[in-house]
Amino acid sequence: MGTAAACLGTVLEDDEQKAAMIEMIRWYKDFPFPEVQPAGLDLPTTIAESELCGVSVGKFMEVQGCAYGDDERKERCAGVTADTTKKLVELLNETL
């Protein structure tokens, strides 16, 4: 989310940036991650209910029964990154 905020800040005016970031946070809190699963592991989806990465990944690790260093966690985080980037581009396309 920090990278998304920085990207928004480089191309949007203050009011647009604030509105887009609020939308990103709302979306992140309610989105069933990960939608993108490039490794094809059929990982379970979880809803963060928070904009914090640690909360989001912690919920996933609990459901998956994996540790922080496990491949499943790494692939899930890659998918979340892809999902978040996709949403960021959609917001920028709508705004610009």
Image: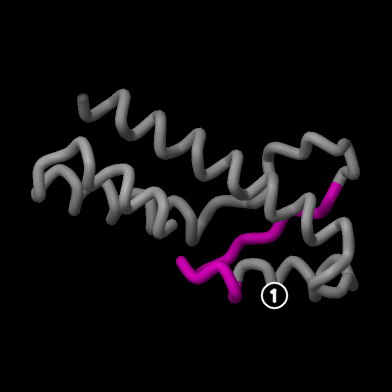
- Local SS, label 1: helix
| Residue of label 1 | 58
Q: Quadrant of residue 64?
A: bottom right
Q: Quadrant of residue 94?
A: top left
Please report the residue visible at 48 percent of the width from the left and 61 percent of the height from the top. Answer: 29
Q: Measured along the vertical axis of the image, is residue 83 above or below residue 58?
A: above
Please report the residue visible at 18 percent of the width from the left and 53 percent of the height from the top. Answer: 18
Taking 84 as reference, is 3 left or right? Answer: left
Magenta stretch, overall SS: loop
4 is within the stretch colored magenta:
no
Taking 57 as reference, is 23 left or right? Answer: left
Which x, y percent locates residue 49? 52, 68
Taking 84 as reference, is 10 left or right? Answer: left
Taking 18 as reference, is 80 left or right? Answer: right
48 is within the stretch colored magenta:
yes
> Which portion, as a residue range, is magenta?
43-55
Q: Measured along the vertical axis of the image, is residue 90 above or below residue 43?
A: above
Which x, y percent locates residue 78? 69, 47
